[in-house]
Image: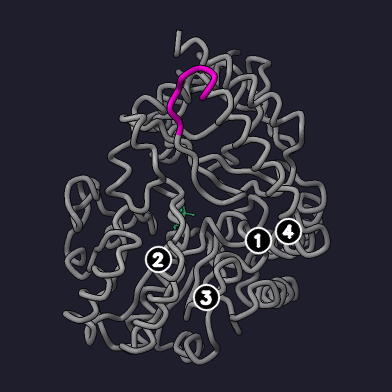
Amino acid sequence: MNSETWRSRAEAVIPGGVSSNVRLSAPRTCFTRGSGARLFDVDGREYVDYLLGQGPAFLGHGHPEVTAAVAEATSRGMVFGAQHTLEIEAAEALVEAIGWAEQVRFGVSGTESDQGALRLARAATGRRRVLRFSGTYHGWLDNVLIDFQAGPTSPASEGQSEASLSEWIVVPFNDRTAVENAFAEHGEHIAAVIVEPVMCNNGVIRAAPGFLELLRSLCTRNGSLLIFDEVITGFRLARGGAAEFFGVTPDLAVYGKAVAGGWPVSAMAGSKELMDLIASGRVNHSGTFNASTMAAAAVLATQKVLREQPPYDGIAAHSATLTTGLAEIAERHGLPLAIQGVNAAFHLGIPKDPASASPATCYEELAGLDLARYARLSHRFAEEGLWVAGRGVWYISAAHNASDAEKALEAFEAVVSKDAA
Ligand SMILES: Cc1ncc(COP(=O)(O)O)c(C=O)c1O
């Protein structure tokens, strides 16, 4: 049975044939398995994967140590309705890796752990409003989902309750003056600032030098909490995430994706003092599947691999080879290309005006990119055996090697040369 047939079956029983709206625009192949940095589909095709399932497969698909640890742990049961030894060891491993945090609470998705952090910040400060940045993503639930094209607090889905969207204060990323003005006007009402230290969901835009430090000092001065949404950056930029990478310490942070090598696990982290609000029951954070044996074993094994075989230097070298190669091919074929980001995640954009290809510093500047053209090209990359996101982000895993980069560059050149012709 080929991908076409599977697709018809999928569309019959799953809305749009996919289980997350983020996948609606993906090329409709049907995969059978992933191994390391490669994916395999029902048509017998092999892909080099620079999407990593939107980020989680940071150690590569089916990492043997993590897979074995999960299998062993789940053979002894999954959820017990109370704590278990692996859960405690996993929490200790995260506290050690994160460095600045004293306690963690496990969840299942980044979306829900973001909710926990926002609730905790409001409870700790007794304030309602939260400052965030246009273009950031903090999950798909009613109180956080915004269509920034439509307006700073516009709902992004039919059926979405708009009741709490007005509590957001939204300013452009990296805009120091806008943040200072927001604090000058609303400081006493701001419970928290929530920020993706590298805005991976739009453009993989890094916080400009000094920007996170500014957020830190404004939060401290105004009695607001600083929340790092490290769902993408956590364990990926460095073992201690963006906080370690940038040298700025938040009050709370949220992790997901890479924390457990691909297993569905998230966590929020903070000081014991803040987390005591949960311990005392004043703040509710719950979840049947939180810290299942599967989740805890995956966290523990992933963190052991990251600690004992840190992949960060290898990823930096791979990233340099890849981005240099992509830029060189684009230049040879006259394709304007803007590349920006960090080692383990970078963004490719095609500037509408080749003369103004400077890196974007905020979501608003991404309007200068031809996002639709890149999305079209990404479907053609898939035909050449290169699996990447349609929105321009490329993720590098610990499993990528020289032959993966070579295959990706060949596929990129095959598409770009035809596109330019
Ligand atoms: C920065 C950020 N926060 C939160 C989320 C939501 O995480 P999840 O998809 O696991 O609910 C995502 C997902 O892409 C994300 O990138």
Q: Where 114 sits versus 260, above or below?
A: below
Q: Which residue is mark 2?
A: 195
Q: Secondary structure at mark 2?
A: strand
User: Which quadrant contains ligand 1?
Assistant: bottom left
Highlighted range, magenta: 331-337
Q: Secondary structure at mark 1?
A: helix
Q: Which residue is mark 1?
A: 295
Decide if residue 72 is on the left or right side of residue 223: right
Give the distance between the C-alpha atoms of the residues marked 1 and 4, in whole angstroms. 11 Å
Viewer-proximal residue, 367 or 333? 333
Q: Which residue is mark 4?
A: 302
Viewer-proximal residue, 256 or 411? 411
Instruction: Choose the circle earlier in sequence order: 2 or 3.
Output: 2
Q: Residue at x 69, y 24 (%)?
A: 407
Give the distance between the C-alpha atoms of the residues marked 2 and 3, in whole angstroms. 12 Å
Residue 9: percent from left, percent from top = 48, 21
Residue 247: quadrant of the picture: bottom right
Instruction: Tell me if residue 371 can be seen.
Output: no
